[in-house]
Image: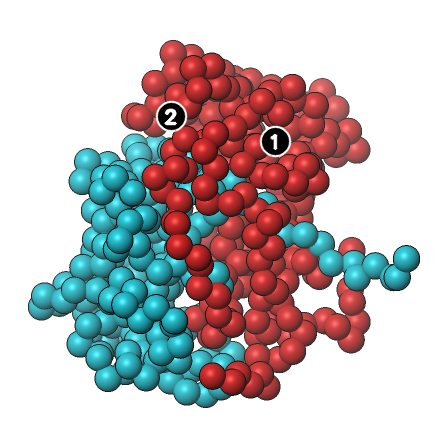
Amino acid sequence: MTEFGINTPPETGAFLPRDRNWHPPAFTPTYKTSVVRAPQKALISFDNSLSEVTGPRFGHNLIGPNDNDLIINFARPGEMAIGQRIIVHGRVLDERGRPVPGVLVEYWQANAGGRYRHKKEGYQAALDPNFGGCGRSITAEDGSYWFRTVKPGAYPWPNGVNDWRPAHIHFSVFGSGFAQRLITQMYFEGDPMLKLCPIVNTIADPAAIEALVAPLDMSNTVPMDARAYKFDIILRGRRSTPFENRREGN
Amino acid sequence: MPQPLNLLKETPSQTAGPYVHIGLTPNFCDITGVYPEDLGTVMVGEATKGERITVTGRIFDGTGTPLRDGLIEIWQADASGRYPGPTDPRGGADPHFTGWGRCPADGETGVYRFETIKPGRVPWPDGRMQAPHISFWIVARGINLGLNTRLYFPEESAANAEDPLLKRLEHQARVPTLVGKREGQTITFDIHLQGPQETIFFDI
Ligand SMILES: [Fe+2]
């Protein structure tokens, strides 16, 4: 990925404003739960202070050896989760294309049958005794992360009478600043359920939806073992103006 | 066509959904043995400097019902107004304070709770001091993009009155939605997603 030379921002710069036409809006009536949970007043915008450009840091020593292997990290010794074995990999970059190293990426998902291990989950698909459904990584110097899992199943949910979520993996990503905090979902290339999903369709721009769809990546597929999907995550970039030199009229 | 700027687009947000606990606080939802503990549950230790406080409250939807599936993360300065870790360019923060907490709403009552210390004052970009505050980030089923707000302290009325952010809000009548209620060492901060008491949310 290109480095932008003279425009390379210092790490203390304020973040570029969020494009809120690209993200889903708060109020999306076809995703019914949003109706009573969407703030109705305008968000108040202000330029970042230290409170927004700083953020928590997690060391590599946080991560246990099986944290990024959902096939075995909840399984009984010698056993494995059931399902299509896949590797999900990608890089965390900022909007300027710079790798974001050393940040925590957490992921969670339903099992191969579309069932979550959660007491509020009511779907009749079977629990897999060897599948917990969570994992985590810290990005490497080049912003990369990867994990091994089983491909999650689609599942029905109470919204419309016959709404189904496409297969997806939830992601939570930290950046270097608290204002970069992001939760999203990764989908799989070619899934016919995608265009039917009220949650996917909270996003208006088809190009933004495509940014959540991981392509099958045969170049990283392990023969006779696991297919690979690639999912890059882009966090907000920082302005190139140094934070210390900014003036603000008020 | 002019040259492209070559900026990438931020990955669009999607709701954290009802099972956010599986990913972020697995021990809380009985997925044990994967991580030794849930992240963000302990912010302070015996050696942490500063005044111990408990920050607690609930998140209410537009019908007045508390959210029982939400999750809150907070980020705050140490007692001297410095942010822990390498991302504060000033350095020198209390090494015994994490600054960051994560807490799921209670599955029955919706109550969240952080045991922390009262933060010091942090400068605004132009050098004026902000009033002590804690940054909040709220995610839940039905919230499509995490919500940002701040908690301020009721005993800091002088600092709050000169806070560069609070001072410039057009609708001053809404400022109290950002100020907790204090009783002893406990600050209660309820968050209202909608309605006449709707909390101020920020686009940061
Ligand atoms: Fe899900």
If the image is split into quadrants, where does the N terminus of chain B sit? bottom right
| Mark carried by residue A17 | none
> Cβ of disc 2 within 8 Å of ligand 1?
no
Residue named by callout 1: A187
- Residue B100 at x, y = what percent? 37, 61
- Tell me what residue is drawn at x 28 percent, y 78 percent: B160
- Tell me what residue is drawn at x 34 percent, y 18 percent: A122
- Tell me what residue is drawn at x 47 percent, y 74 percent: A49
Relative vertical location of residue B51 with respect to residue B178 in this rendering, above or below = below
Q: Quadrant of residue A42?
A: bottom left
> Cβ of disc 1 within 8 Å of ligand 1?
no
Relative vertical location of residue A194 with respect to residue B119 in this rendering, above or below = above
Chain under callout 2: A
Q: CA distance from mark 1 to mark 2?
A: 20 Å
Q: Is residue A187 left or right of residue B155?
A: right
- If you read the primary sequence from the N terminus, does the residue marked by circle 1 or circle 2 appear first? 2
Q: Looking at the image, which residue sits at the far right?
A: B1
Residue named by callout 2: A117
Q: Residues within 10 Å of mark 2 (few under 14, many from 20)?
A: many
- Residue A38 at x, y = what percent? 40, 44
Q: Residues within 10 Å of mark 1 (few under 14, many from 20)?
A: many
Q: Colour of chain B?
A: cyan
Q: Looking at the image, which residue sits at the far left?
A: B184
Q: Nearer the viewer, mark 1 or mark 2?
A: 1
Q: Amino acid at mark 2?
A: Arg
Q: Colour of chain A?
A: red
